[in-house]
Image (cartoon, rainbow, N blue to C red):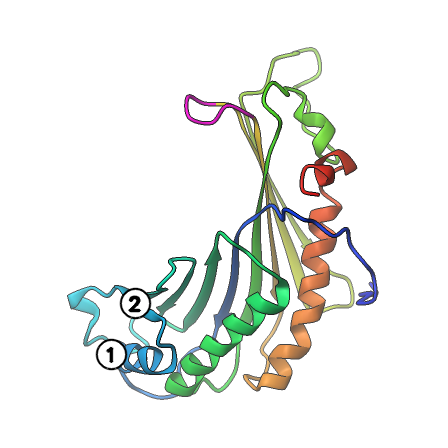
Amino acid sequence: MKIDLGEEFPKLGRPPIVEAVLSVWARPGRSGDLSQIVEQFEEGASDYSVAMFPVAAAGKALEEEDSWVRLESDDGKRSINVRKGVYEFHWVGGYKTWDFFSMAALEMWRVYRGVTEPPEIQRMSVRFVNRLDLPEGETRFEGYLEGPPEPPRGLELPFVGYFHRDQFLVPEQPYTVRILRTIEAPTGTVGSWRIIVDVEVSTIGPMSTADAAVKSRLPDMQWLKNKAFFGSVTGKAIELCR
């Protein structure tokens, strides 16, 4: 499969992204404990502070199963989760651009890499959770999804919810794509139907921890997540985000 990095996708004035995540699975190459990671993050990023750091985890070695810590930015939109051999960067709400997101995620990854010195990356993924709020009174969500769900033949029942997962292998490329599509019916607090399109692109096989190696994968992963999202919704859905 050819990845066309020159392909242009629709420009959205109101991106439906509610959460963006970059995760890196990289087992530590040196011994140490989580307290060292906390110190380095707080030194390298003045706008982050510890949000969750259980007392029991303070002295845990980096490689222990139940070692974890969470740091959050002052504005509450960005967070970093570190657990056994895994670095996660989350951006929740107020998403700007891919370049802004990836730059912030890689800046904090370098801090994690500097402390843990992993010999290689086992896997890397980008995950984008998109939410479409349909107009109030709109009940035909089928017009917003490509290949919308249908009730069983001969049993024409109205939907009150829907959950579907697809997993794909990208031919001739070291990536997989996972797409979750969920439909949420109106509730007492939410007066309209919601469609969630959750896309995750992951690498296959080990790779170098060097900046050049990581950066070389990100454009492919951005293209794949865009292709997956825009291929999962209709033009009518895209117009909601203009």
In terms of depth relative to the viewer, which is nearer, 130 or 205?
130
Q: Earlier in the sequence, mark 1 or mark 2?
A: 1
From the top left corner, tell me how far across and down residue 38 is, in percent.
Answer: 29, 76
Compared with residue 118, is residue 78 higher up or lower down, i.e. above or below? above
State how far apart marks 1 and 2 are (Cα). 9 Å
Which residue is at 30% across, 67% downward?
A: 68
Specify few, some or many for label 1: CA neighbours under 10 Å numbering under 14, 14-19, or 20 or more. Answer: some
Mark 2 residue element: strand
- Residue at image point 55% right, 70% down: 123
Label 1 SS:
helix
Q: Mark 2 belongs to which amino acid?
A: Val
- The structure residue drawn at horizontal position 71% and vertical position 51%, both measured from the top left corner, is 228
What residue is shown with label 2?
Answer: 69
Inspect the image, locate mark 1, and give the three-letter code of the amino acid beneath it. Answer: Ser
Q: Main secondary structure of the magenta part?
A: loop
Q: Tell me if residue 182 is in the magenta stretch.
A: no
Image side of residue 169 versus residue 108, left or right: right
The picture places residue 34, in percent across and down from the top left corner, at 27, 77
| Residue 70 in view, yes or no | yes
Question: Which residues are the magenta region?
Answer: 187-192
Please give the label number shown on residue 188: none
188 above or below 129?
above
Query: Would you say residue 122 is visible in this rendering?
Result: no
From the viewer's side, name the closer residue of 82 and 204. 82
Work out which residue is located at the far left of the displayed protein and give it. 55
Quadrant of the snapshot with the C terminus: top right
Q: Residue at the spot x=48%, y=71% of the render?
A: 25
Q: Quadrant of the N terminus?
A: bottom right
Label ID, residue 35: 1
For disc 2, the neighbor class at 10 Å (few under 14, some 14 to 19, many from 20) is many
